[in-house]
Amino acid sequence: MTWRQAFGFIVAFASAAVADGARAEALAGCEPTDKACLMKAMKAHPAKTRAFWQAALAKPVAERLGPAPEGLTEFLRLDNLVNGFPEKPRPSRLAPDFLADVRGAIADLPPAVRRAFGASFAGVWFVDDLGGTGFTDMFLDGKGRPEGGFIVLDAAVLGKFKANAWATWKENTPFKPAPGWSLEAKIEPPASDDRRGAIRYILLHELGHVLSINRDVHPSWNLAPKEVPAGARFPFFELSWTIDRKEGKYASRFDATFPKRAFVVYYLGAKLEAADMAPAYAALAKTDFPTLYAATSPGDDFAESFVSYVHTVLMKRPWEVVIRKDGKVVATHRPCWGEARCAAKERILASLLGQ
């Protein structure tokens, strides 16, 4: 499994993708419709090894970026074929102003964040036609053990958004639009409401996934819930989640008081009504999830908690969701850091970052 974020647009898993794949060229010796061969090729691909990333890992963190190398784009094409995405990723041609925004976003990161990724972060690489905006996967050491991660972003999609417009779009995706209802998100003040701010926030979310590799914050994303060892301990995960081994799924500890959590779906089709906005955020405020997206899965709980903590606590930047009905504010939601309900998660994040 990989982490793929559909920031910027909704990806359709259409049967047309399979038909498209049938006409595509063979990759890694596999026919485009041979899923077993494609999966085997992905697992054995050089991009999954430390050796592939050795040159990048030797550079300072701020220099581990650029157009995706050809070997990585081949790996991404394999992943797209396996998962039914019709897109065919190709290396981006990065405009100087875009590259300046990326470098600026990385330079903005607190020193504690940059230190945390020195040995495990193989860089952020850019393609066009990814089939989403963000993609994160792990690479393995010589013995096949997870060692670190790499991030891929779609430069063409990122170029379209300023920070608050992107955040507002994202936070609306779980809810069906309806007359009179609106939800506005703010993650930057007016002076820094720009593309750089959007890139920084998206990058921090993906870095949260990288940070989780080889740290016992939640079960590995390479394991199905029923495959997680019975005696394994995950201090961050255990604050909010349990493993339902009978059903083979993760369950939130807050489902009794937040029953609609199971219907919170980002990017891939809203399941909640617009009238559910205020009740959903009221229920969220009684949990230890800092954002609504954090309530969707253990992996995104950690990644969202990480970006929220770094963005608001370490970087002192705003984060706010305002819900209106007929122009009148009916609910406002802010992160939970500093509140008793999120104190345990805050201690774990502070410890991971050496605070």
Image: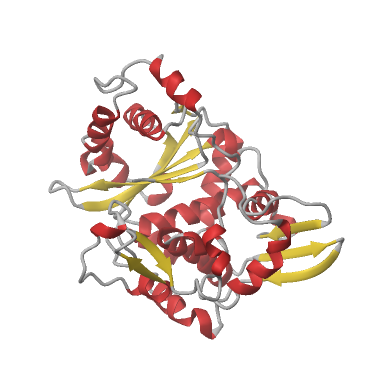
Of residues 66 and 42, which is closer to you in this image?
42
Q: Where does the image place residue 47, in percent across and percent down from the top left? A: 28, 37
* Residue positioned 21% across, 35% down in the render: 44
Q: Quadrant of residue 324?
A: bottom right
Left or right of 79, for residue 293: right
- Considering only vertical position in the picture, is 192 above or below 139? below
Q: Where does the image place residue 143, in percent across and percent down from the top left? A: 12, 48
* Residue positioned 56% across, 58% down in the render: 264
Left or right of 257, for residue 275: right
- Considering only vertical position in the picture, is 134 above or below 118? above
- Considering only vertical position in the picture, is 131 above or below 215? above
| Residue 291 appears in the rendering | no
Q: Where does the image place residue 301, in percent across and percent down from the top left? A: 46, 64
* Residue positioned 51% across, 39% down in the render: 132
- Considering only vertical position in the picture, is 293 above or below 46? below
* Residue positioned 45% across, 52% down in the render: 206
